Image (cartoon, rainbow, N blue to C red):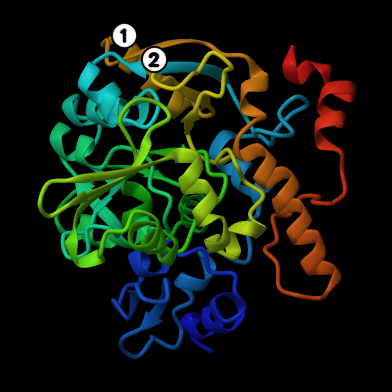
């Protein structure tokens, strides 16, 4: 059985596909493409019978977190790291360039780190996600090679994007050193590539990974629902889209072809898309992208009020990540300060460590397919009580 046939049977057909695009990005024969209508991969030509690469690196069914942590960091998480993963430093920060900071959903640190790496000969290109030209309410993987292209791809997108699908294309275009920004599932796939040492050219090209904290993601039909039924804008009149435009926390904003802007609050966006959660995302247990070199996300400090300048919360995990952050700060691309550890136990933590655990446990109870993270995941477990009463070091 070919790798894709196994993928179809055990992952895609079982509802475990994350839509990360990794199988497309590594396929040596270009037999796999993304079906953007159904948000899953499909074969466009015959799959080599002895090639199992797509199946081996897939993060949909099998995610051996302990092995991936040892691979990436030389150790597994220790006491005090149970809920957010291996960490060398917990900090918050922002891009010192006001344009970069304002372009981001929070503090613009991810963009600033990519710009620093591009302008200081660390990488040739960054793998990011940006607006589709054909359907400007949809988003797709992009290759950014300069400041302008990085900033054009800034800000959060609450929609499935097969970011890793573009890895092969980046190498074909001659880029040999890549920085990748993606969600936990994108990071899982990259580490699995490194674990298997395949594809060698791809593995050797990736110089660092920036993971995005991820609570939940949505099928694109949820965005279309927001645009057409909530904002009242026909899809053929959409010229652009921002999930979090303007000052923190941002407004869901549709830009029409005649230059008008129709906006709703971030809370309204959440309310109207909650029914469009991607089923596989509801079984994800990784909120903080635990195998990335650096994890970034919103700082949920109580001081963060609507309209104030945003801050980025960061978990620096690897030596590669630490060097990148330190060097970018020394070069004045970013500013950082210490952060309270409890700030990471808000937002998507609730979705993944409670909701994700619940869905996995319930599906197992019914004998349905679930992802295997190779670590204990049980519900009910009173995680908040356990953290604050039995693990005071987590918030010390």
Residue 199 can be seen, yes or no: no
Name the quarter where the N terminus is drawn.
Answer: bottom right
Q: Is 40 placed above or below 147 here?
A: below
Pick whichever, 315 or 171, lies toward us: 315
Of residues 48 and 299, the one nearer the viewer is 299
Task: Name the spot of residue 307 as percent of width and height, x first.
Answer: 39, 20
The residue beneath circle 1 is 330
Label 2 residue SS: helix
- Within 10 angstroms of label 1, few (less than 14), some, or many (20 or more) residues? few
Name which quarter of the figure residue 79 lies in. top right
Q: Is residue 144 left or right of residue 184?
A: left
Q: Position of residue 256 (x, y in %)?
A: 18, 52
Measured Cα–Cα span from mark 2 to mark 1 = 6 Å
In the depicted structure, whether residue 72 falls above or below residue 322? below
Residue name at image x 22 percent, y 44 percent = 261
Q: Are marks 2 and 1 in contact (CB under 8 Å)?
A: yes
* Residue marked by disc 2: 326
Q: Is residue 91 left or right of residue 263?
A: right
Query: Considering depth in this image, is 97 or 211 the residue closer to the camera?
Result: 97
What residue appears at the point 20 percent right and 31 percent down from the top-left corner?
118
What's the residue at 60%, 26% (across, down)? 87
SS for dot 1: helix
Residue 194 location (% of width, % of height): 47, 52
- The reply, left or right, for residue 112 in relation to residue 186 is left
| Quarter of the image with the C terminus in it | top right
Is residue 205 positioned above or below 118 on the image? below
**Residue 237, placed above or below residue 308:** below
- Badge 2: residue crowd in 10 Å (few <14, some 14–19, many ≥20): some
């Amino acid at each position: 059985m070919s790798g894709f046939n196994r993928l179809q049977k055990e992952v895609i057909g079982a509802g475990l596909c994350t839509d990360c695009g990794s199988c497309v990005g590594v396929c040596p024969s270009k037999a796999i493409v993304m079906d953007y209508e159904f948000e899953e991969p499909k074969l466009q030509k015959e799959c080599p019978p002895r090639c199992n690469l797509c199946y081996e690196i897939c993060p949909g069914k099998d995610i051996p977190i302990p092995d991936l942590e040892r691979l990436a960091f030389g150790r597994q998480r220790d006491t005090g790291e149970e809920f957010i993963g291996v960490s060398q430093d917990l900090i918050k920060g922002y891009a010192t360039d006001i344009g970069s900071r304002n372009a981001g959903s929070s503090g613009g640190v991810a963009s600033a780190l990519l710009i620093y790496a591009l302008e200081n000969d660390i990488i040739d290109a960054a793998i990011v996600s940006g607006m589709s030209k054909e359907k400007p309410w949809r988003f797709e993987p992009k290759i950014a090679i300069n400041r302008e292209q990085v900033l054009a791809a800034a800000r959060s997108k609450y929609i499935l994007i097969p970011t890793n699908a573009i890895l092969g294309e980046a190498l074909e275009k001659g880029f040999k050193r890549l920085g990748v920004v993606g969600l936990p599932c994108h990071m899982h796939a990259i580490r699995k590539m490194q674990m298997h040492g395949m594809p060698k050219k791809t593995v050797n090209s990736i110089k660092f990974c920036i993971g995005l904290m991820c609570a939940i993601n949505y099928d694109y039909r949820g965005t279309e629902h927001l645009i057409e039924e909530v904002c009242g804008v026909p899809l053929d009149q959409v010229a652009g889209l921002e999930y979090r435009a303007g000052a923190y926390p941002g407004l869901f904003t549709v830009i029409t072809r005649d230059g008008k802007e129709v906006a709703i609050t971030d809370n309204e966006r959440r309310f109207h898309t909650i029914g469009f959660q991607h089923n596989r995302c509801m079984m994800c247990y990784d909120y903080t992208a635990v195998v990335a070199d650096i994890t970034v996300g919103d700082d949920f400090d109580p001081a963060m009020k609507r309209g104030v300048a945003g801050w980025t919360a960061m978990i620096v995990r690897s030596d590669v990540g630490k060097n990148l952050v330190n060097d970018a700060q020394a070069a004045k691309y970013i500013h950082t300060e210490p952060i309270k550890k409890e700030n990471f136990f808000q937002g998507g933590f609730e979705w993944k460590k409670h909701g994700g655990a619940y869905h996995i446990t319930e599906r197992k109870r019914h004998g349905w397919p679930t992802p295997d993270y190779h670590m204990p995941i049980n519900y009910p477990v009173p995680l908040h009580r356990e953290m604050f009463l039995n693990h005071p070091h987590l918030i010390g």
